Image (cartoon, rainbow, N blue to C red):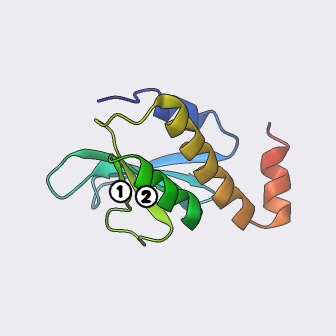
Amino acid sequence: MKYTWMDEYLLAKPGVEKDYKPEWDAVRYMIRGKMFGMQGGDKVGKPIFTMKLAPMDGQLLRSTYKDIVPGYYMNKEHWNSLYLEGDVPDDVVRDMLDQSYEVLLKSLTRKVQQEIQDQR
């Protein structure tokens, strides 16, 4: 599997929590209990990482890279799945992860955003 650095990268971000959801067989990345990313598998067990992105950004990425597809088992407009054995460059994946984190962070209350920003 490529992108073995992702877990450490995400957990280094302020406010990020990680848990394992056994019924989904997936690891979730959250801020204050709200998910912005999930690592699991598709219907045939291929490893994927699903993340929330702005709709226009997700569409552009899906049209550019064959290994980025509409979110598996998620809202196809807001969620995108990255095949972890694919060929998307690391810098693009980092940018996607950063965007996903920021999309969720901006959806939280200003008070919570400030608490998390103060952790930086």
Residue shown at the point (59%, 40%) measured from the top left: 95
Q: Which residue is mark 1?
A: 69
- The correct choice, above or below, for 16 with respect to 36 in the image is above
> Which circle marks residue 80 in the picture?
2
- The local secondary structure at tag 1 comes to strand
- The correct choice, above or below, for 90 with respect to 97 in the image is above
Is residue 49 among what the camera can see?
yes
Looking at the rendering, which quadrant does residue 1 occupy?
top left
Q: Nearer the viewer, residue 69 or 3?
A: 69
Q: Nearer the viewer, residue 74 or 96?
A: 96
Q: Position of residue 110 (x, y in %)?
A: 84, 64
Pointers 1 and 2 in contact (C-beta within 8 Å) = yes
Residue shown at the point (48%, 61%) measured from the top left: 59
Q: Looking at the image, which residue sits at the far left?
A: 44
Q: Amino acid at mark 1?
A: Val
Q: Position of residue 31 (x, y in %)?
A: 62, 54
Residue shown at the point (31%, 37%) measured from the top left: 86
